[in-house]
Image (spheres, helix red, strand yellow):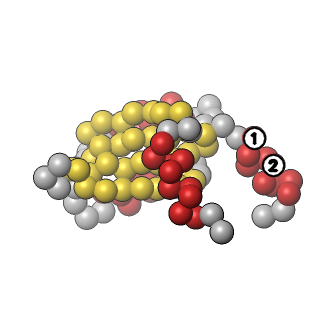
Amino acid sequence: MNAINRNEQNALARAVLEIDVNNHAGVMSHVVGLFSRRSYNVEGILCLPVGDGRQSRIWLLVNEDQRLAQMMKQAEKLEDVIAIRRHNADHAVFQDLESFFRP
C-alpha cells in the first residue's frame, strides 16, 4: 500500500459491530457475505462461541460511512442474527488484537 492510500485509510472513521448469532456452520459466511455483496469492506473479523456454545459473537471492524446504518438494519434481518450493537472504533476488542499483528 502506498503512502497516499495509507493516509486515506487512516482518515476513514471506523466502527466495531458486535453481532450475536446462532452458532452453526455457515453463519459467519452469511453475515460477512451480506457486507461483501454490497461492496462494504470489512477490515477485521473475530468470532468465538459464547456461553454453552449455542451462540457465537462476531466482531466486525468496518469503515463507518453513510451506509452503515442500513447495513446494520439488513444484518438484523438475517435469520440467525440475534442482536447487533455498534461501538466506536476504539473498542478494546480490536485495539488489543492489533498488538499480535505488529512486526
Tell me the SS state at disc 2. helix
Residue 29, labelled with which disc? none
Q: Which residue is mark 1?
A: 11
Residue shown at 42% from the left, 56% from the top: 46
Instruction: Indicate left or right for 93 with 5 as reference.
Output: left
Quarter of the image where one finds residue 66: top right
- Circle 2 packing at 10 Å, graded few (<14), some (14-19), many (20+), is few
Q: Are marks 2 and 1 in contact (CB under 8 Å)?
A: yes
**Residue 70 percent across, percent down from the top left:** 50, 33
Q: Position of residue 98 (x, y in %)?
A: 56, 56
Residue that numbered label 2 is attached to: 7
**Foreground residue among 12 and 95:** 95
User: Residue extending furthest left?
Assistant: 52
Measure the C-alpha gap from mark 2 to mark 1: 6 Å
Q: What's the residue type where badge 1 is placed?
A: Ala
Residue at 73% across, 46% down = 10
Say what secondary structure mark 1 lies in.
helix
